[in-house]
């Protein structure tokens, strides 16, 4: 049985030791987390200090997978709440209603004027579900990294495997692209959303990438990351597993939270 302790061990191993195990989980899950990378160098700005950013990880991961981007946001002057939730144990609707109110309470306790969201993979669906039912007036902007906004074609393929269903629980079974998937029921977004997705699967993802139509990050196609009503969209040369660890991703996330759009004139490599 996969336990939380195994997640903790996985996320604390080095990138090169951990990659085969992460790849194994990738085969069994439609989404996964990432590894540590160099922090970006944005300068703090006073106007950001009263803005809170709620971070939500993806399926099969923990809050540890977003520690690098959380550190970058803190360095840029944002208050962060990097919330964990038991992604394999409950449906997306229940996970959203459990995790997000706790995070919002922490932001409110810190007397933040504006609340943003930064999500990886399935975390974006939690935010879409929650905000479709509980909008609030001090909502700022949302950045989604590799979100299966129209479902994951890889999830469609792996649904037939009993081990996928057992390992990923109810939420994993909701990631399909068809009418039974949760993505089909969420509708357009009505708030500022910037989406960053990848088009460079890792070598370990190539087998699964070939099962996805068009450009993809190894888990989600570029087209399926999009959502009706989104504000901006950016494709970067990274994989689903590690996109949130990249310096460029972190810098573009900060750019969107501050300015409401990505910087497409200069994307440093």
Image (spheres, grey):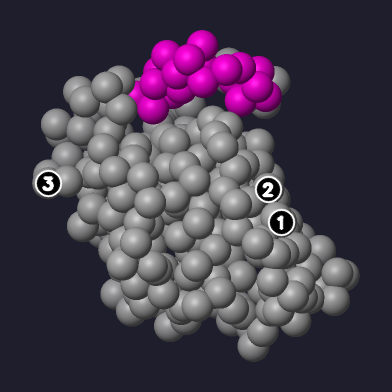
Q: Is residue 170 visible?
A: no
Graded by Cα atoms within 10 Å as few (under 14), some (14 to 19) or many (20 or more), the crowding at tag 1 reads some
Whether residue 201 can be seen here = yes
Q: Earlier in the sequence, mark 2 or mark 3?
A: 2
Q: Which range of residues does the magenta coloring cover? A: 8-28
Q: Earlier in the sequence, mark 3 or mark 1?
A: 1
Residue 137 to residue 114: above or below: below
Q: Nearer the viewer, mark 3 or mark 1?
A: 1
Q: Nearer the viewer, mark 2 or mark 3?
A: 2
- Residue at the image point whose x is 60% and y is 58% from the top: 42
Q: In this rendering, is residue 206 above or below 45?
A: above
Circles 2 and 3, Cβ within 8 Å, touching? The answer is no
The label number, if any, that marks residue 214 in the structure image: 3
Which residue position is annotated with label 2?
71
1 and 2 marks in contact (CB < 8 Å)? yes
Residue 232 in the image: state x and y as whole percent.
34, 72
Place of residue 246 in the rendered image (x, y in percent of width and height, measured from the top left): 47, 42
Q: Is residue 13 magenta?
A: yes
- Could you tell whether 141 is left or right of 205 in the image? right
The residue drawn where x is 38% and y is 51% is 268
Magenta part, dominant SS:
helix
Q: Which residue is mark 1?
A: 74
Q: Secondary structure at mark 3?
A: loop
Name above or below for residue 31 compared with residue 79: above
């Amino acid at each position: 049985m996969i336990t939380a302790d195994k997640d903790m061990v996985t996320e604390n191993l080095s990138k090169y030791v951990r990659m085969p195990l992460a790849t194994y989980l990738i085969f069994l899950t439609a989404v996964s987390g990432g590894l540590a990378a160099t922090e970006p160098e944005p300068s703090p700005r006073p106007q950001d200090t009263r803005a809170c950013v709620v971070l939500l990880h993806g399926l099969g991961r923990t809050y540890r997978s977003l520690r690098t981007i959380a550190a970058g946001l803190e360095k840029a002057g944002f208050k962060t709440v990097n919330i964990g939730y038991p992604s394999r144990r409950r449906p997306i609707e229940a996970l959203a209603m459990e995790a997000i109110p706790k995070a919002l309470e922490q932001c409110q306790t810190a007397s933040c004027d504006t609340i943003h969201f930064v999500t990886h993979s399935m975390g974006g669906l939690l935010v879409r579900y929650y905000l479709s039912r509980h909008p609030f007036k001090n909502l700022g902007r949302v950045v989604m990294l590799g979100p299966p906004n129209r479902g994951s074609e890889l999830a469609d393929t792996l649904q037939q495997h009993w081990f996928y269903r057992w390992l990923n629980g109810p939420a994993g079974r909701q990631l399909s692209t068809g009418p039974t998937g949760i993505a089909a029921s969420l509708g357009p977004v009505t708030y500022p959303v910037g989406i960053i997705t990848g088009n460079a699967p890792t070598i370990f993802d190539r087998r699964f990438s070939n099962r996805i139509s068009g450009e993809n990050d190894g888990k989600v196609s570029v087209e399926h990351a999009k959502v009706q009503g989104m504000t901006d969209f950016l494709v970067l040369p990274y994989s689903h597993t590690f996109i949130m660890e990249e310096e460029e991703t972190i810098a573009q996330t900060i750019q969107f939270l501050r300015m409401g759009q990505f910087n497409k004139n200069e994307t440093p490599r």
